[in-house]
Image (cartoon, rainbow, N blue to C red):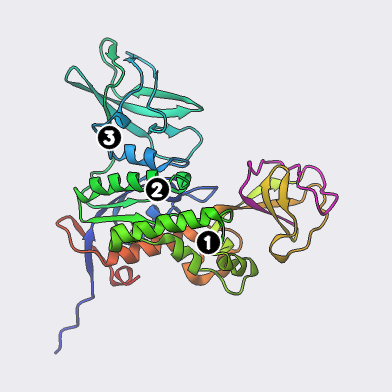
């Protein structure tokens, strides 16, 4: 009697610390667990620490990873007193603020600072332009912290498994800064593990092929690929290539070399509170604000590229400009962030669940090619082959 062949498996590190901005955290009205790190966790059984915070620059991501520990970037810009109750306002060098911003998706940020040999930990939050420090444990008496005192981030996951770095989207216009920040993060990661990766920077509808911003992003991505080779996970190209060739907006986006509409975050924005009485206006009355810019609005059968409260493209993607009655439903699709929308189910390239699934699958494919570790989990063959 022959012995059945064993089921193929692949051994990989059992944890992932994913550092980044909103592309990593997840964005824009998507359901909980749809962000790509959560999907990787569900598919692989890895323990995942999502260290993404929306709107942060590469520098802010880097200081949260302790990439600039021991430098002025990770110090307090002015003196303050750790209180015996409540919170205290603190200041950081401009551009180096690590804190979670109220109203922006992200994890709590924990900092530690040492005064006279004693370490004090607490959470750091941002409200508007104000940064607050709330001690995890209050001292018996107030403690003075001098200006220039160093702090380090208290990470939720040790960097001993896999580390993913996704940064630069919010400050890609400063390539030298982005590349230096990523280099600093890579230095931290590769000092801890061999399973580290750098994700490429995504371009939005505002940076189509042929524009100066597109060229800047492509140049940065080319440099990342040159510097880090097999450690680069090219999520930008993966999203672009997974367009739906039967869907006209996706075909248009593919021609512009931007991620396709069907793989972006969408949600019901609200309803018109006043009619749209002509086919040229860009001033709309909607029950919920679409924000300053950056969405495709669908009203009845018309798509509208909403660029600002006074600028838009009526009849986008080949639809016809039309008038619309008060009370008409308004659907919005973000033109940067991956996710799912009403068109995603017809795009079978990413299992019908949108752009974050594409990123998760791209990361899993990269992960399947990595070496073994002493801290491992066994992946099913189906996952190892994705």
CA neighbours of label 1 inside 10 A, class few (<14), some (14 to 19), many (20+): many
In the picture as drawn, the residue positioned furthest to the bottom comes out as 1
Which contiguous range is marked in magenta? 273-299
Residue 254 placed where, x, y %? 56, 67
Q: Is residue 275 magenta?
A: yes
The answer to whether the residue labelled 2 contacts the one labelled 1, judged by CB atoms less than 8 Å apart, is: no
**Rendered image: mark on residue 259:** 1
Report the residue marked by disc 3. 154
The residue shown at (49%, 26%) is 129
The residue shown at (40%, 57%) is 221
Residue 317 placed where, x, y %? 68, 63
Image vertical order of residue 148 relative to residue 27, above or below: above
Report the residue marked by disc 2. 167
Residue 32 placed where, x, y %? 47, 49
Q: CA distance from mark 2 to mark 1?
A: 17 Å
| Foreground of the two, 124 or 188 | 188
Q: How many labels sit on residues?
A: 3
The answer to whether the residue labelled 3 contacts the one labelled 1, judged by CB atoms less than 8 Å apart, is: no
């Amino acid at each position: 009697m022959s012995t059945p062949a064993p089921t193929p498996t692949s051994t990989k590190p059992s944890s992932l610390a994913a550092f980044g901005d909103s592309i990593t955290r997840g964005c824009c009205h998507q359901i909980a667990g749809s962000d790509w790190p959560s999907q990787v966790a569900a598919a692989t059984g890895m323990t995942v620490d999502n260290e993404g915070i929306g709107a942060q620059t590469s520098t802010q991501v880097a200081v949260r990873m302790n990439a600039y520990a021991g430098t002025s970037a990770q110090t307090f810009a002015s003196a303050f007193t750790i209180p015996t109750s409540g919170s205290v306002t603190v200041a950081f060098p401009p551009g180096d603020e690590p804190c979670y911003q109220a109203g922006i998706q992200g994890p709590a940020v924990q900092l530690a600072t040492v005064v006279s040999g004693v370490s004090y930990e607490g959470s750091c939050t941002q409200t508007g332009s104000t940064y607050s420090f709330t001690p995890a444990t209050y001292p018996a008496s107030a403690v003075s912290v001098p200006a220039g005192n160093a702090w380090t981030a208290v990470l939720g996951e040790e960097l001993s498994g896999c580390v993913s770095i996704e940064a630069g989207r919010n400050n890609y216009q400063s390539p030298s800064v982005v590349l230096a920040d990523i280099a600093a993060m890579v230095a931290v990661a590769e000092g801890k593990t061999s399973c580290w990766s750098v994700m490429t920077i995504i371009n939005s509808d505002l940076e189509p092929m042929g524009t100066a911003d597109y060229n800047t992003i492509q140049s940065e991505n080319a440099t990342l690929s040159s510097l880090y080779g097999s450690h680069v996970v090219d999520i930008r190209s993966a999203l672009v290539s997974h367009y739906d060739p039967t869907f006209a907006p996706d075909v248009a986006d593919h021609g512009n070399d931007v991620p396709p509409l069907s793989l972006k975050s969408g949600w019901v924005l609200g309803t018109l509170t006043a009619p749209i009485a002509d086919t040229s206006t860009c001033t709309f009355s909607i029950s919920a604000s679409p924000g300053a810019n950056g969405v495709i609005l669908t009203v009845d059968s018309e798509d509208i590229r909403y660029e600002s409260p006074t600028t838009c493209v009526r009849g986008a993607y080949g639809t016809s400009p039309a008038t619309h009655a008060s009370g008409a439903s308004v659907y919005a699709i973000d033109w940067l962030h991956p996710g799912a929308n009403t068109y995603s189910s017809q795009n079978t390239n990413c299992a019908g669940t949108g752009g974050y699934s594409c990123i998760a699958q791209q990361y899993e494919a990269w992960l399947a090619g990595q070496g073994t570790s002493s801290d491992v989990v066994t992946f099913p063959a189906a996952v190892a082959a994705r």
